[in-house]
Image (cartoon, helix red, strand yellow):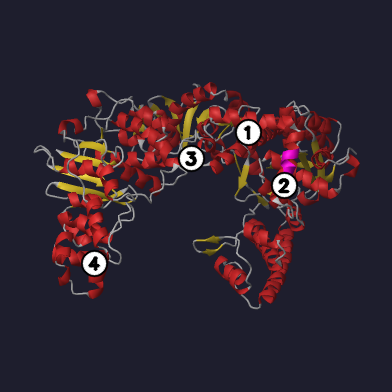
Amino acid sequence: MRVYLIDGFSLLYRAFYALPQSISTSSGLPTNALYGFTSMILKILGEDENAGIGVVWDSGKPQFRLEVYPEYKAQRSSMPEELKVQLTHLDEILAAMNIPAVRAEGFEADDVLATLSRRVPDEVEKLLIVTGDQDAMQLVDGKVKVLRTTRGVSETKEYGSDEVVEEYGVRPEQIPDYKALVGDSSDNIPGVRGIGPKGAANLLQQFGTVENLYENLDSVKAKGTRAKLEDGRDLAFVSLSLARMRFDAPAEFDAEALRFEGIKPEVRDVFRRYEFRSLEPRLNGLPVAGGEELPPTERLEVRVTEGPAELSFEPAAAAPVGDGRWCVAVEDDEVRLVDGLPDGTLRVHDAKGLGVRGAAFDTYLAGYLVKPGLGSYDLDSLAGPRGLAEVDVEHEDLGVREAARKAAQIRALSPKLDEELREMGLSQLYYDVELPLADVLGEMEEIGMPVDVSTLEEVGEEIEGRIEELQAKIYEEVGHPFNIGSPKQLGEVLFEEMSIPPTRKTKTGYSTDAKVLQQLANQGFTIAEKIVTYRELAKLKGTYIDGLVGLIREDGRIHTRLNQTTTATGRISSDSPNLQNIPIRTELGARIRDAFTSSPGRRLVVADYSQIELRILAHMTGEPALVQSFTTGEDVHTRTASEVFDVRLESVTPELRRRAKMVNFGILYGISGFGLASRLGNVHPAEAERYIKRYLERYPRVTELMEGTIAEAEETGYSTTLFGRRRYVPELKNPNKNVRKLGERVAFNARVQGTAADIIKVAMIDLQPRLRSLGADMLMQVHDELVFDVEEETVDEVAALAAERMVAAYDLHPPLEVEVKVGDRWGRVEPWAVR
């Protein structure tokens, strides 16, 4: 029998610092240390399930060492809050895995391990001490080995006597003497100043022990070394006392108590509670305590049948294989291969990506809605935690086998996800919004945006000219050419050659990121202002000129991809290319939009919600001043300026209105005084903080909504939109105060922004069939804006329809308002008026 004794805190700290601290549950509990610790135990059990295993913990303070040296471990900072909160959950995980804990009051784990290492019974053929520390090397003796973590917790190296000598140059029993000379910063063992690892090994090879070394100090030939040893005599013996492990802890080696009897049946539920998705499959094959079995992972055994399928049954589950061939799960245990399937009858995974219209169920979208922000919604990620990880398919063709496996997973997953949606109150949002929206977005992707390549090239040449002109001015101000795109060279130029005070340094040098450069520009450094502009122009050229030209297809259009599952708030995003991020407040950004045109003989109609998020805020709060501004047609930013800056409405200047606008939108995003000051420019953070404070004093119901939203999210773990969409906010449970503050901002913003995202989706679904009947196409969605390609003779009808249906998407008080513009180019649309 082999026995593994795990040095608990050593491995726990090792896991905490080796794995990203961003690993957490959807409710916000950090789990990186728990995950790494559990992974190591599974690795041991997977390699030797018949072994004994236990985790050894410190218990109380080691008074005998503190009496010798009060500064023992005094330099160690307290356990990080992010680790402390995990420690309280480790007992539950270890109990479910049936791993015993070993402690001895008043003794450190090292001493318990030392005691047990000298009390190994005959039936134990090998004892492996699992640790990340070097202290345990002194215990290596015969059948006692050390299994030391060498890289995080994923790689280990076994140490016997030969390995200890090879690495340290001393025998295992000399390790305390070695540490007495070298010291150990992790335990605050001082050692002898000036004696390093190589010198200590040489001395111990000659003299054997610290005691013998000092008894024969005159035999040390090197005068300098002898002097160091003489000066450090007292600390050397103190260090020796600290480094020696005790062998008298009140602990007995009970091999039978340590024998691994198998994991407990509830372990799978525990793993799912801590969201150990990738670890859960590793439970399969491990013995279960008491001869019981784990709650079964639903094992799907399917056979593949070639030939036509009857499609009159309930909606089939399908996954594509090859060109045009589909696997269709006809029954639970039978999969048929067919070519092409009718729309409206299928359960699929990613309907839009597959080109399926009218899917009956989409596991991809359902998985996203149940847990937005998960990152991956592939079938295995969704199936594993729901007990559907295993599918057996027999077929000689790998592609057929994989497609059949997916089809079986889709069929089994669909009812489970449907039930989850119903239990979470998300069924209506799913079936009435997300599922039909996939069809709308799919059509938009197929249609694409018409592009005038000559306009793009013309703008590109103009930007290139400006870049060259700006580069020359930068070189002139600096005094010589350099690589402006190199952060290293730029940092040297700004902060060394030009002696500009650096704002922030990184591990690799001076920071020259956008925030730093903008701060320097605000302080009046003209070189920084030029570089900011240079970077903006270079980005425009690379992303929106060169990038766009390369993506124009043979039909003269750009077909962006519109994503439903990439944002946690529910907003639609765009990529390949991203057409939502074209700058609209700059002249060149507007020129780039000019390149997007209507089709020949048609016109563009652009409908944009007016201040939708502020209207949602007014609706949610019922704040009289806000509601009045919108219902009377009063400019809301002017009203806010009057309230915040305490001036009469007629006395509000354009600058005050600009500041008020920043405050209005800053409130929606939970902006801080520092953040607002940065946006406003030339305003001290304290002054910006006063703006926010005055706003919240004048609009008290906004404060009530903020506080209520945060309190609800803290209790439930998520914030909700008016449509019931959930945005999980794990940051609210984070021990770090700054992260929690971020969570508060996220919770409030998600409620407002997510509602706006839901509203425009409803409008898009409502509009699509109506537009089709008028021969109009929906081309693009950019946050609160929709772009349509319309026949000349139906412009007025489509414009009126868009305004009407977008307003009707949700009954807000104050009501929604839509601004409609018309033109031949996206960047040159003008306000629409009925002709």
Q: Tag 2 or tag 4, which sits nearer the N-term?
A: 4
Q: Amino acid at mark 1?
A: Leu
Does residue 386 sit above or below 242 in this rendering? Answer: above
Labels 2 & 1 near each other (Cβ < 8 A): no
Residue named by callout 3:
376
Q: Which mark is residue 688?
A: 2
* Of residues 664 and 173, the one drawn nearer to the viewer in this rendering: 173
Residue at image point 17% right, 68% down: 217
Magenta extent: 690-694
Magenta-drawn stretch, dominant element (helix, strand or loop) = helix
Gap in angstroms between the C-alphas marked 3 and 1: 20 Å
Gap in angstroms between the C-alphas marked 2 and 1: 41 Å
Q: Amino acid at mark 2?
A: Ala
**Residue 773 seen by the camera:** no
Q: Which mark is residue 437?
A: 1
- Image location of residue 193, percent across then percent down: 30, 64
Q: Tag 1 or tag 3, which sits nearer the N-term?
A: 3
